[in-house]
Structures are given as C-alpha cells and as structure tokens.
C-alpha cells in the first residue's frame, strides 16, 4: 500500500491545538497580537503532532468500533492488548517486556505527574537534562518537587551527557529520581547502550530511580537502533518506562499511553489509584497500531528522513551560519541560529518568527535551560510546508 504524505489537510474547525490553540498556548495574553498573515496561512511547525492522517488500518479499526454503537465503560487491562505492545517492542527494538508489568494511563504526561508524586517525598529532588521538554518541570512543580538541572554537552555538533556533573548531582541524598528522555527531546539524540549503562550505574549506585520517557522510541532514522533503558538492566525494578503510540501514529488526541512498572509496590499502588477504564476508540486505535501499523510507519520514516535531508541541504546553502545536524530520532529539527543575532537581543524567537515570518515554531526559551539561540521545527508535515517554512525563516535571518 502507498501512503500520501504530501497531502495538505485542512485542520481548521477541528479543535486542533496546532492551528486553533497556538495563540493562547504560546503567547498567553494574545488579544492584541497581530501576525502578518491570517491564521490559516501561518505555517505551523511547533507542537509535536503530525500534519498527516494516521495509518488507514487504525482509521478502519476505529470505524469498526464506532459501528458497534455501544461506548460504555471499557477495560484497558485486556491481556491481548498488553501482549500486542510486548510483541511490537520485541519486533522493533529486540527486547521483551513482561506484559504483566504494563498499566494504562491517560497519557505519558499524566503518568509522569503521578509517578513524581509517588516517588518523591517532601523535600526530595529530581534531576533532568537540559535542554528539556518543559512538562518535566511542570510535573515537578505540580508536586512541589525541586528540579536539579544537568546540562547536555555540545561537542562537534552532537549532544552528550555530562557524566561527571551527573555524578556530583546524584550524590545529594535528597535527590532520588531522574526524569529521563530516551530518545531525547528536543535534540533528537538517540542514546547508545554504553551511555545508558553508564548512566544507570551512576543512578542505581546512588539510590536514584529512573523514569524513562520513551515516547519517541519508534521515530528513528532509517537504520538507526533504539535501545530501551530496561533492556540494559533487565532485572532492575528501579526503571519506570513511559511509552505511547501517540507520537508514532499521530494519536495524541486519543489521550492514551502505557507505563511499564516492574516494581511490585509501585505497580500495586498505581493499580489501586487508577481504574483500568479507557476510551473504547483509543483502545481500538492503539491495538490496531501495534498489530497492523508497521508498513505505514516504515513509509513515514522514509518521508521524514527525506524532510530532514531537505532541511540539511537548505541550511547548508541558504543559512550557512546556522548549526544543524540531522538528529538520530524524532521528527523535530533542533537548529542553532544564534550567529544571526550577534548584534541583537532577541529573547523570544517564537514570537519573532510568528510576527516577522508567519511561522509558528518553538524557540529555545521554551526548553527550560541550555537552549539559547535554538529553534525547534516539527518536520512531520508535507514537504511543501517544510520548504515554505524554511523560506520564510530564511527571509527573516537574511
């Protein structure tokens, strides 16, 4: 089957955050905010969902469930569903989880909010690596947990963990949790098995539990290898893994995810606090994704890879002062453009490009720390949109 990722889909009047919620989400008090073009003509390259329809196999599964006509309380604890997740991960990432360790949630972020509350007592701290997805901080703040930052190191265009700094931070006895992103958002870094081994050893030697957000695990460049953190430490119960098909198959609006909890005490606490009830359409969609979504994902991977090549070529030819390498994972381009602002003090790149270029993107200020001069572009959109967005960005920088 062939899939048309070049198709432009009108998302107006669908309550899409990307096109109808960006003003309030990104700019807060936006009543008097003006852009150079009508909202429908702005290029949206910000929030991490796709401008593609999901796999037709998933749509068909949802249709069949709709035709059933009854949408009562629906259990998400079905054994065959959890086994479909295990089979998917084993096939794609060569590791087999115990399906009895999997629980469902309303999303990775709701799971994170809950896990931080359970793992961190009053006065305890959590560690994150910056730049960072901002909701890691929101989850900590909501639970009155102090966050400690360790900065990723940039070396010849690639990002690396600062293991010496991490060692010094986790020696603090009040720091008991690492909120980790594997693969990393926003840099797209795909951590190696050796890096995960070293990080895990440091954490476990200091009594630190790891929450590993692996929501982008299926979105890797063609030929790249993703390593589940638990695969490195198969016997450890100090790793909690958060996964979802939401990024992989553009299903974020289904508000569904899974958490893998090998620790018996923590898992029993989760099950006592969460009813195994989910939206029946979400359950149908995710089961179809894990059982039938492979061919669509393979086609998507090739298309996004070509979008990254387009961006790389454009930057080399038209924005030579920018710093960019094609990331190993995600559909997010992390681009350093600080050289174009040497004589200008621009704190909010999100607002700048919205008002000057008609492009909605996310500036480095949205990623907590260690991100000055960066922009993040969502490339999960038709190539024509990518090219138009780059042209507009270039017109501002040049």
Image: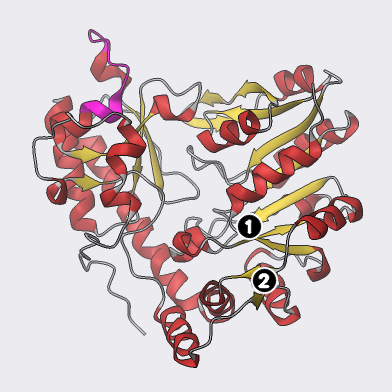
Task: Name the residue at 44% across, 91% down.
Answer: 67
For the N terminus, the image quarter is bottom left
Front residue of 359/373: it is: 359
Residue farthest to the top?
Answer: 343
Determine the residue positioned at 23% across, 7% down.
343
Q: Which residue matches tag 1? A: 243
Q: Which residue is found at the position 84% from the left and 50% from the top?
A: 233
Q: Quadrant of residue 166?
A: top right
Image coordinates for residue 342, horizontal then vertical, percent: 26, 11
Mark 1 and mark 2 in contact? Answer it, CB < 8 Å.
Answer: yes
Secondary structure at numbered mark 2: helix
Residue 257: image location, x then y, percent: 61, 61
Q: Residue at x 47, y 29 (%)?
A: 367
Q: How many marks?
A: 2
From the viewer's perspective, is residue 163 above or below residue 114?
above
Quadrant housing residue 153: top right
Q: Is residue 133 visible?
A: no
The C terminus: image quadrant:
top left
* Residue at numbered disc 2: 85
The range drawn in magenta is: 342-352
Numbered label attached to residue 335: none
On the image, the x and y values in percent for residue 92 come to 62, 68
């Amino acid at each position: 089957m062939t899939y048309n990722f070049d198709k432009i889909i009108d998302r107006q009047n669908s309550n899409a955050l990307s096109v109808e919620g960006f003003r309030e989400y990104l700019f807060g008090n936006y009543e008097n905010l003006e852009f150079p073009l009508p909202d429908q003509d702005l290029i949206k390259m910000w929030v991490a969902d796709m401008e593609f329809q999901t796999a037709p196999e998933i749509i068909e599964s949802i249709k069949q469930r709709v035709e059933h006509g009854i949408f009562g309380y629906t259990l998400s604890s079905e054994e065959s569903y959890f086994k479909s997740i295990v089979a998917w991960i084993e096939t794609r990432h060569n590791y087999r989880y115990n399906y009895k360790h999997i629980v469902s949630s309303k999303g990775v972020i709701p799971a994170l909010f809950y896990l931080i509350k359970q793992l961190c007592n009053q006065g305890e701290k959590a560690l994150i690596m910056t730049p960072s997805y901002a909701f890691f901080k929101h989850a900590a703040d909501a639970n009155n947990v102090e966050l400690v930052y360790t900065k990723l190191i940039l070396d010849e265009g690639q990002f690396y963990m600062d293991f010496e700094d991490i060692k010094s931070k986790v020696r603090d006895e009040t720091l008991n949790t690492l909120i980790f992103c594997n693969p990393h958002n926003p840099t797209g870094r795909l951590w190696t098995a050796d890096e995960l081994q070293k990080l895990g050893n440091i954490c476990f030697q200091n009594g630190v539990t790891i929450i590993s957000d692996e929501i982008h695990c299926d979105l890797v460049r063609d030929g790249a290898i993703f390593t589940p953190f638990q695969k490195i430490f198969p016997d450890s119960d100090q790793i909690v893994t958060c996964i979802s098909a939401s990024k992989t198959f553009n299903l974020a609006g289904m508000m569904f995810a899974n958490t893998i909890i090998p620790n018996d005490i923590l898992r029993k606490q989760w099950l006592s606090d969460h009813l195994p009830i989910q939206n029946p359409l979400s359950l149908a969609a995710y089961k179809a994704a894990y059982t039938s979504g492979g061919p669509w994902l393979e086609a998507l991977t090739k298309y996004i890879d070509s979008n990254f090549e387009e961006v790389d070529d454009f930057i080399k030819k038209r924005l030579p002062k920018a710093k960019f390498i094609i990331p190993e994972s995600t559909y997010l381009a992390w681009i350093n453009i600080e050289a174009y602002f040497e004589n200008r003090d621009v704190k909010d790149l999100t607002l700048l490009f919205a008002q000057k270029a008609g492009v909605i993107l996310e500036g480095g200020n949205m990623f907590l720390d260690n991100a000055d001069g960066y922009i993040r572009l969502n490339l999960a959109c038709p190539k024509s949109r990518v090219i138009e967005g780059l042209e507009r960005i270039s017109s501002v920088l040049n």
